[in-house]
Image (cartoon, grey):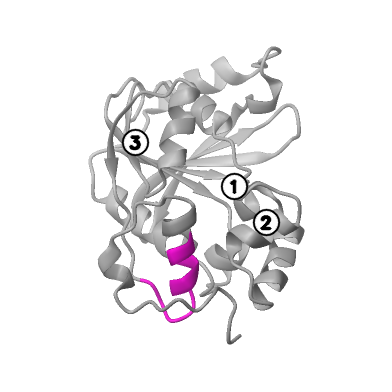
Amino acid sequence: MGIPKDRAEELLRENADHRCEDALDTCVRIRAIADLPTRFGEYQVVAFESPADRKEHAAFVHGDVCERDDVPVRLHSECLTGDAIGSLRCDCRDQLIESLERIGQMETGIVLYLRQEGRGIGFVNKIRAYQLQDAGFDTVQANELLGFRPDERDYGVAAHMLGSLHVRSIQILTNNPMKVADLERHGVRIVGRIPVAVPPNEVNRPYLETKRRKLGHLLDLEQFDDLTDVPEGAGR
């Protein structure tokens, strides 16, 4: 059972005219809720919209998460090339599938799908970063050469989404300690971390090593036993 119908209707009424005037850049409101049977289990999809930039975000909800503690939550930033096309350059699709499968087997859980393509730099700049990686730079160097920080994402919108769903505390599915710190900065109570370990492929091994070494991702070092020091993009 997911969010009950009467509770869903209440959430929609609460959000009908919601607007955070003092924090408009992280404000979102619930616009629609529907059942979503998936190959990963029974979900509901909750559609959010930002009144500031009209971006649309989604929460894929398994079970009744409202007023619950210790809810397993995966924050997943949009990756068109990985999620939709199956790119081997990253591990985004693998992490998304792993999270949906695991949460689908739990009592409750949420996958938040955020429109933050390319670690927040947007699709066009992400492809420009790929061009630089093809020339031998790693993912961090490529972002910096384009004038960005290694990771431009902010999780204030995610915190607002969890608040709108009345989630009291979460266990976060992530390997990224910066994600944990940023959510806590936005007031989310995190009671535990669940690693999302997926094996590397022959293309993304150097990329994952860069995430581990330069961005502090808590990846299982056994995944990297066969890694060499070949830079990202070399040999492509």
In the rendered view, would you say 70 is above or below 209? above
Residue where numbered disc 1 is placed: 151
Label 3 element class: loop
Q: Is residue 12 at least partly visible in the picture? A: yes
Label 2 element class: helix
N-terminal label among 2 and 1: 2
- In depth, the one of 7 and 194 nearer the eye is 194
Does the residue at mark 3 contact the one at mark 2 (Cβ under 8 Å)?
Answer: no
Residue 205 shown in magenta: yes
- Answer left or right for 93 relative to 169: right
Residue where numbered disc 2 is placed: 143
Q: Which residues are magenta?
A: 200-210
Residue where numbered disc 3 is placed: 2
Which residue appears at 66% of the width and 18% of the height? 23
Q: Amino acid at mark 3?
A: Gly
Residue 134: quarter of image: bottom right
Q: Amino acid at mark 2?
A: Asn
In the rendered view, would you say 17 is above or below 217? above
Does the residue at mark 2 contact the one at mark 1 (Cβ under 8 Å)?
Answer: yes
Count the marks: how many?
3
User: Horizontal and vertical percent for residue 91?
Assistant: 46, 65
